[in-house]
Image (cartoon, coloured by chain):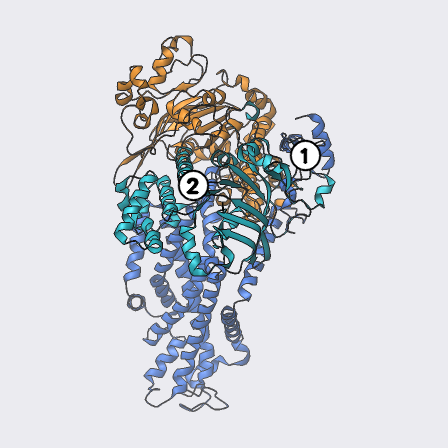
Amino acid sequence: MSGDGTSERSGRRSEERAQPPAEQARSGAQPTSMSGEEPATVNGDANTTGGNGSGTAKLRSARSIVWARRRAALAGFWRLYRVQGAGMAGLGILVAITLITLLAPLYSDESELRASNAPGGRMESPSTEFWFGTDQVGRSILTMVIWGARVSLQVGLVAALLAVTLGTLIGMAAAHFGGWISWLLMRLTDWFIVLPNLVLAIALVIALGPSKVTIIVAIALTSWASTARVVRAQTMAIEGRPYLERAQALGAGHWHQMTRHVLPNLMPLVLASATLQVSSAILAEASLSFLGLGGPEMSWGTILERAFSAGAISVGAWWYMLPPGLAILLVVLAFTLCGRAMEVVLNPRLRGN
Amino acid sequence: MSGDATNERSGRQSEERAQPPAEQARNGARPENMNDGTAAPMLSARDLAVQFTAPGGRVARAVDGVNLDLRPGEILALAGESGCGKTTLARTLLGLERPTAGTVSYGGSALRYSTKALKRYRRAVQLVLQDPTGALNPRHTVYDAVAEGLRIHRVHDNERDRVADALSRAGLRPPEKFFLTYPHELSGGQRQRVVIAGALVLEPQIIIADEPVASLDASVRGEILALIMRLRDELGLAAIVVTHDLGLAWNIADRIAVMYLGRIVEEGPVDRVLTEPRHPYTRALVSVLPNSPVPEPVVLSGEPPDATEVPGGCRFHPRCQVLASGLAEQAGVADACRRTDLPVLSAETRRPPDTAGDPGQSAAGDTGSRVACHYAHATTASPA
Amino acid sequence: MTPVLEIDDLRITYRGSRGEIPAVRGISLRLEPGDTLGLAGESGCGKSTVAGAVLRLLPVGTDVTGRIVLDGEDVLAMSFGRLRAVRWAGASIVFQGAMHSLNPVQRIARQIAEPIVLHEGLSADAAEKRAVELMSQVGLPAWRARSYPHQLSGGQRQRVMIAMALACSPKLIIADEATTALDVMIQAQVLTLIKKLVAERNIALIMISHDLSVLADTCARLAVMYAGKLVEQGPSNEVFADARHPYARALSAAFPTVGDPAERRNPHGLAGDPPDPSALPTGCSFHPRCPVAMNECATATVELRRAREDWQAACLRVEEVA
């Protein structure tokens, strides 16, 4: 490799830092066997691809690169999500419910939920004043459902988050460490899978005393196991990929492998699973509350329980049972639609073709 | 990791940077000096064995006694069919697999398997995998993939420049253009360059490449091989290239070790081993190549046995064409072939004259190749 | 003699989500009984698409024009029923990756026998007897007949695929990277077998690979594809040793001859990457990577030109190169 070639080339790429060895490397790449009359211009790998409009921006720091990457990923996700009708419908419902719930203090008076402050008569059927009628002490069912949403959603979200976090950690640990740790964790998981969830949750709530926190804990403790199983399987699949071997050979420890490679690749699965988990947590909360194990705060499940104990069925007060029931149905449906849509976006195999 | 450790490391690192790598390269890269045994080996394996327990409790002897030296600036090809243990050997040399017996030593001291020692070792010895598509996390940009090693080893200064430098050394230029690219936007050859850049960024001493071009397109293959050779010439990198492709060894390697069922059966300079193979197995492998330097093609029947069922005697004897043709009988070694296991080849490339007749060393004459074969020993030792 | 296969100006366009992708852009081939043709090229050059088109195995909606005549019958005009018959008895394909093509829960003799039962109307027992004969022809012991695919090694499974391909005595066998994944020695075994069978039965063979040295060793003629077109066609040994098209030259140099001092410590590659089929360069599609390109190459339409008797190359410099 001659010095001439080197200087000639580095002249051509003056914007680069001078890198004699690297430049030399370039000239070596020419197929020397096929010597034409003139030195062939190697436009090589560098020019043929890599364009794609992405790399040309002048990027100063690693941080800006990271952020650009995340923005791009998010935009890509949204592009694929947006085209799914059911997913968008679910998202629309969720946004609407969230707004109604969060803005409740602006248009509705919480004090009307107290029996002493009830605005209407007993068991009034729907009217223009009380769209969904009133309960046995004269409170507006609509107001109750709106304020009950806060508790139901809160319990559902927090319990799902806890369950998924727990399941993910246990699943990852079981897959990564193997040996007796894995054996122990998986037996525990199996045990929780076969136990009837509701019965266990009831037992837990009774043992710990009914409150919002106990319900959250009970739901989380009884629903992490399925996540753990899925996460373990997926972690094992990811750990079999060569890039983990490469990371290991680069000197990466458990923490690096888990946080840099395994977890980001699990996130799609975990997110979708969390969304679906919210649905079942809301249902579980409703069941527990309906069985009379809810806290003092009003949730949809509590409303149903009160309707039942107030004999709403025997007096034909359908407006007492239907609104909270429909609210549960709607929210569960919305979360399920979103979860399924996310699964489709994040798992190309479900996308068809 | 404490702050102290980090400082210490980056201090050490700048020392390393300070050494002119070119100097090293000059010494190592001269093929003429390669086999004179003057340079101390950088990486060596002594009596290395790796066993796995196969399902059913049988023991697979994946690596079954290997001595191997890698000298500075040398490219060593590790050849053999799939299942011969070459990949396991490479993984053991990288510290990814723990040997059941024997030692791997780097720079003269035995490799320790503590987390810290391994991490330090992995800065110096880098892996390049066969399939660049699988070796890159699809969610990481090229920048992240290359910077990963730096982040693992907490080298935070000049990260961007180091990444750019590694990418351009690996032939991806201008590097900035590739920073934000994802692996799926690159061609196979480019991906392999990214993997190589990811190895280079830590300024290693040794690269171990497992079939680096097997999954690449034919026209790109030569480019990647040329890159590995250039890195040796410019940076003085030593390399072990694991391959089933003898053409690859002929293209870039200085020395070749041919493995069969967990052992090296022949080892020596590529020019010798591939033009005048002495072990019947090597001979057969070379003979089936197109336009082979060995005249008669020998197509061995059957397939290598499982590593759980290593035959007694010479491990190659059930398939050996020399034994089957009766040549071994004539040389009077047929019995030894069937009954006597051969000693493990030692790693001494240059023998003092007094051991020249030692059959374990094999009377190699001036070829410098060593072979584990009763017949070869018998026929070379006898005059004519 | 009627040719076994005649392909005339074959053009194949895939319709994908990213628009139309021309995979094959005008290819003509002709094979007589006993002819062996090596079809070489890199991934994405269209070589497997040609193979698929011969038996109409391409995805629905793929646009195929031109003419494919298999043993006197126009494949593109065939009814589906006729096509099914032709798929085994007229021509058969051996694919890479035999593991995925075999049914994992069926004994291998049954799988080999299946096309015989379907196409020749033999009873299951008679067909299995034939299957065992075929197995011995491809070097598989008879007791293997009762094995399941997972009990066989890669080389043995590839032999099963070859036995299946032979089952209905086809006139043409297409081996698509059939030996690529195999070890050198097993590959040598399978290639020896293919060569022997082709010679014995006067079968025409198209072997598809990226490894020119293997093709040159097995086939009488070589055809090299680049970006959906033939860039060179001629007698194997001559093309391998002294190709006229710079791309074919690069491809043959990519696999060195062990023992050749000129190639020792001297790997040859070709800079750049194969072109994106949906955005091909103008003129000669190889010109951006070509080491001997001239200005003209960027604009001129380059068709196959005669280099010598029975030897063509699609290069403007076909006379001077080499």
Identify by letter the chain in cyan: C
Circle 2 crowding by C-alpha within 10 Å: few under 14, some 14–19, many from 20: some
The tag earlier along the polypeptide, 2 or 1, is 2
Do the residues bearing badges 2 and 1 touch, measured as CB atoms within 8 Å? no
Write the residue at 54% across / 62% down: A80
Tell me what hue chain B is rendered in: orange
Identify by letter the chain in blue: A
Residue tagged by mark 2?
C202
Q: In the rendered view, would you say B241 is above or below C276?
A: above
Write the residue at 38% across / 22% down: B279
Which numbered disc covers residue C319?
A: 1
Q: Secondary structure at mark 1?
A: loop
Q: Secondary structure at mark 2?
A: loop
Give the amino acid at mark 1. Answer: Glu
Q: Nearer the viewer, residue C319 or B239?
A: C319
Give the amino acid at mark 2. Answer: Asn
Outermost residue on the front side: it is: C1
Q: Nearer the viewer, residue A205 or B147?
A: B147
